[in-house]
Structure formats: structure tokens, C-alpha cells
Amino acid sequence: MGQYDGPDGLKIYWCERLERLAAEQHKLRMKIDRALVDAMADGVSIRALAEASGISKSTLHRRFY
């Protein structure tokens, strides 16, 4: 593990990994939101988007209305 050796090594490793994953998650959420907005602009219903995305209708309403 090299730089992660020592008493705090695993903690540093996992914190850095989780930070990277959180950044990736944020980027993906932004892409999903953009796709949802585009779909709504094209007239796709909230119900259809909820079924396709697995996001509840109430969550979609809160996010976009």
C-alpha cells in the first residue's frame, strides 16, 4: 500500500476513496437530472420517468417543480 502504511493508512485510503466515489456520484446525478429535464421538455410524463428511472414521482416533483 505504500503511502497508506501506518496506523492511519487505512483511514486515509478509505476516506480518499469515498471522496472520489462521492464526486463520481455527483457527476452522475447531474447527468441524470439533465436527461430528466430533456425528457420532460420533450413531453415525457413524470409517471413514465419515475417508472423508467426508479425515482419516485414525489421525488421528481420536488426536484423539478
Image: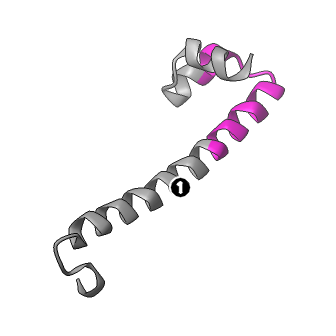
Q: Residue furthest left?
A: 7
Q: Residue 34, located in which quarter of the rendered image?
A: top right
Residue at left offset 62%, top offset 23%: 49
| The one of 22 and 38 positioned closer to us in this rendering | 22
Q: How many marks?
A: 1
Residue 42: in sight, yes or no? no
Residue at left offset 74%, top offset 16%: 65
| The one of 6 and 37 positioned closer to us in this rendering | 6
Q: Residue furthest right?
A: 41
Q: Residue 43, located in which quarter of the rendered image?
A: top right
Q: Residue furthest bottom?
A: 2
Residue at left offset 26%, top offset 78%: 4
Relative placement, left or right, of 36 versus 7 is right
- The residue identified by callout 1 is 23
Residue 52 x/y as whole percent: 54, 27
Range drawn in magenta: 30-49
Relative placement, left or right, of 61 versus 3 is right
Residue 41: in sight, yes or no? yes
Residue at left offset 25%, top offset 87%: 2
Q: Secondary structure at mark 1?
A: helix
Secondary structure mainly formed by the magenta segment: helix
Residue 47 x/y as whole percent: 61, 14
Does the magenta portion include 28?
Answer: no
Q: Is residue 65 above or below residue 1?
A: above
Residue type beneath disc 1:
Ala
Residue 30 x/y as whole percent: 65, 44
Relative placement, left or right, of 7 versus 41 is left
